[in-house]
Image (cartoon, rainbow, N blue to C red):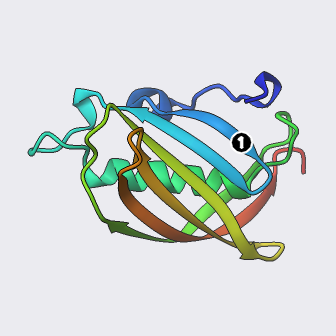
Amino acid sequence: MDPKLKEDPYPFQAHVGFEITEWSEGYCRVEQPMVDHIGNRYGIPHGGVHATLLDTAMGYAICFTGDPDDKQLAMTLSLNVQYLGVAKGQRLIAEGRRTGGGRSTVFAEGEIKDENGTLIATATAVFRLRGTSKG
């Protein structure tokens, strides 16, 4: 990813530990190492972590401006997650893609795989764009 486009982690992101590794017009990739604090009682990543990674990847995919000083802001209106498998690897990889929408309401889809290619979860979402940080 172009270092000029990279944003500093926000507090929740820093706490959970995920990183945005690719970001371009209509696309975002988020990676999360398998660490103990994301696990549930079964010792696998909590479903809320999957939802967080998907929401983040899709949200960033719709918010790309190409200018790190002009942040597009958005709110999630609807998030639907389908849990399909259990990660066997050491890293969760979420990808989000913009699928449509207009000036203020935008649609996206996403998926999570581990580094071995195992499909873990898929999602769809609806977002409301809230303007940019410059206006």
Direction front: furthest residue: 116
Quarter occupied by the N terminus: top right
- 66 and 11: which one is in front? 66
Q: Is residue 49 above or below residue 67?
A: below
Q: Position of residue 99 (x, y in %)?
A: 69, 71
Residue under the image location 53 percent in, 61 percent down? 110
Question: Relative to 14, is 129 above or below?
Answer: below
Task: Using residue 73 as the reference point, say whether residue 92 is left or right of it.
Answer: left
Quadrant of residue 58 in the image?
Answer: bottom right
Q: Position of residue 31 (x, y in %)?
A: 49, 36
Given the current orientation, which residue lies at the most extreme left position? 41
| Residue 78 appears left or right of 38 | right
Residue at x-position 41% and y-position 47%: 117
Near-viewer residue (112 or 63): 112
Q: Nearer the viewer, residue 121 or 16?
A: 121
| Residue assigned mark 1 | 23
Q: Report crowding for label 1: few under 14, some 14 to 19, many 20 or more residues within 10 A (C-alpha).
A: many
Q: Position of residue 108 (x, y in %)?
A: 62, 68
- Is 37 left, or right, of 100 in this rendering? left
Examine the image and state in which quarter residue 62 appears: bottom right
Left or right relative to 83: residue 104: right
Helix, strand or loop under label 1: strand
Picture residue at 27% right of the left edge, 37% below the top: 38
Mark 1: amino acid: Trp
Q: Position of residue 88 (x, y in %)?
A: 25, 41
Q: Is residue 53 above or below residue 37?
A: below
Total numbered circles: 1
